[in-house]
Image (tube, coloured by chain):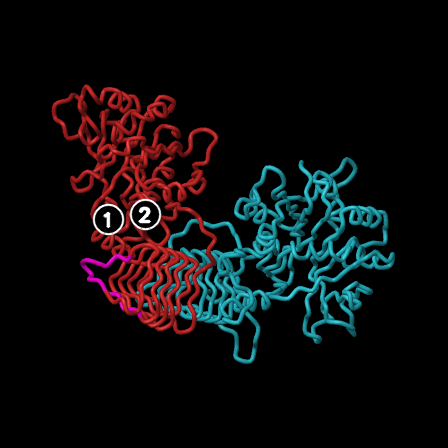
Amino acid sequence: MKKRMLGVIDATTYHEDLEELTVHRSLAAVPFAGRYRLIDFVLSNMVNSDIESVAIFPKYQYRSLMDHLGSGKNWDLNRKRDGLFFFPSPLLDSPSIGIGSFNHFAANLDYFYRSKQEYALISNCFTVFNMDFRPVLDRHIMTGCDITVVRQDGRSLEMYLVKTSLLISLIENRNETGYTCMSDVVTDIHHSYTICNYEYTGLAVMIDSIENYFAASMGLLEPEAWKNIFLRSQPIFTKVKDEPPTRYVKGASAKNSMIANGCMIEGTVENSIISRGVKIGKGSVVKNCIIMQKTHIGENCVLDSVILDKDVKVESGARIEGRHEMPLVIRKGTVQGALMNS
Amino acid sequence: MGKKKCVAMLLAGGKGSRLSSLTKSLAKPAVPFGGKYRIIDFTLSNCTNSGIDTVGVLTQYQPLVLNSYIGIGSAWDLDRKNGGVTVLPPYSESSEVKWYTGTASAIYQNLNFLKQYDPEYVLILSGDHIYKMNYELMLNYHIEKGAEATISVIKVPWQEASRFGIMNTDEEMRVAEFEEKPAYPKNNLASMGIYIFNWSVLKEYLEMDDRNPESSHDFGKDIIPLMLDENKKLFAYPFNGYWKDVGTVKSLWEANMDLLDDECELNLFDHDWRIYSVNPNHPPQYISTQAEVAESLINEGCTIEGEVEKSVLFQGVLVGKNTVIRESVIMPDAVIGENVYIEKAIVPSGLNIPDGVVISASEEDDEIILITPEMIQGICS
């Protein structure tokens, strides 16, 4: 049953509403849930669904994405045959369109020609979910559809299953047909392809704005939600860091929070998501926050409804508060002084 | 194989009998430590951090867990084209099976492994100890002193000195005498079981030792005394810092508790000397609304709904509601139910502790309880 599907991840998407978090990185590399990047979810799902060849098509600021993926070893994709392929777009000026841009794929058609897998699963890079794609393939074959669209409550999750041969012909004939991407094909009613839908009932959140990034993160603090995403039988893989376990010192307190490794907690943490290597100083109170990797918070700070990007330094005594419905985002690598109250 | 300046030989075949049921099915170097590690991670990380990229790991007792843990050494960056980590189990020859009968015989039977790399120096290590040490500094010392063998030593409290192998040295740190567990120690410099030998000297003495039917084939008991008798240049290398032989349940517990102490010299958060380990893929730890955590070290994949105080929790541990865990070490994937009370105990990997169980040492007794499946069965039946 193995080696039947190719994984194709479109990582060219740019959401203007997420600009604060994507100045330095591609959307696929946006940190999530304390130790992951958005791409980890779809990539791990593919690996857990027996997909052994994955092509990633990135654009814009892909340094952090490449650094994260490396040889693909953490996803068991450093293989002699197949494995992980990285195809940065040569078309930097082309406008961003829907998921599965045929122009981008066309620049690397050889990958599709050479692959022996009969089917291809094309996906976006920004959905948080834990899904087995094998039942989608089974249904696709059973119903004899040309294109299967994964949907939730009727809404497209922008994941498409097609025969690799059909994908190749869609790419080759893009100028004649006028279809620029998969969603063009699916939404057009004037062709003869049979389009089927696959309804996904598990948790799936497409991250496309700061508000829903924040809401999805906070939603993970509900045990029902994280149990849906983090399954032992289908783990979400990510780049391994050799951080020690997190240490809570005397006087520290944590409630309703997800905390990654390598943190030093001396203050109080509530309803928050804390990434690897974060320090929270004595007397500081962190509530309803997302704190990214290696950010250091001094002593006696008060933070509420704030997203602190990586490597931020918050000086002792600082008070930073956002609103729950619209959190404040502090950019990567900045210093927040006690007198710079925002 | 390319020539190497220094090759490390890591003795990892020990049973660690005093660790009781913890080493029933795994060798002592594979015993979990510090919320995330196995004991051998410290020595392997020291090697890679010291620039030693060729390590032979000698296994014998219950090697399965250790073998699969070490793999090809990629966790410690020791998956190398030339060198890297090689697991060396005992093997049979045409006439007989040769078990490793002592530390020296283990190395002797792998002289062919060393010959491949034609090293100048051989570093002999033990996989039983928790410490961070730069072996490169020790090698530089060995070269500067013009030594034929250098033994790393640490000052131990005088009252404990008679438990160790003690080195009596002159002012230049040249070893004049070695006493194994002396009743009346003249010195408190204890051997740490870490040796650097000039390869030619090591080969000569191991071959000599193998021919001696009286020998117990042990570095401390046979090789070092013989070299001293023959007036070889042996130096002691003084080490300052945290070093612990976690040979007993109590010392294993103590070493874990040391990590919760602000004054502890063993800093796991030092990015310049990381301790590497095989990282299982677990989500971040989840601390629930009812939970309380203080003065603890907690790894990824834990779900805490109860109270955890002064404890070390490994990956994947579940702590149920209204449960209290104090001054304890909870090894990977243990499941602690609701309304449980555990104090001063070690819970081994994967053990399931049902709701309502109470385990704590009596007030006057300062022993640490190593919880076993039989004990739980006894309580619940």
Magenta-colored stretch includes residue A56: no
Q: Position of residue B288 (x, y in %)?
A: 32, 63
In the displayed structure, A70 sits above or below B291; it is above
Amino acid at the residue labelled 2 = His
The residue beneath circle 2 is A24
State the separation of the CA atoms marked 2 and 1. Answer: 11 Å
Amino acid at the residue labelled 1 = Leu
Image: magenta residue range: A318-330
- Secondary element at tag 2: loop
The residue at the far bottom in this view is B364
Local packing at callout 2 (Cα closer than 10 Å; few below 14, some 14-19, many 20+) is some
Q: Subunit of mark 1?
A: A
Say which chain is cyan: B
Q: Which mark is residue A18?
A: 1
Local packing at callout 1 (Cα closer than 10 Å; few below 14, some 14-19, many 20+) is some
Circles 2 and 1 on the same subunit: yes
Q: Colour of chain A?
A: red
In the displayed structure, A77 sits above or below A328; it is above
Q: Position of residue B316 (x, y in %)?
A: 42, 56
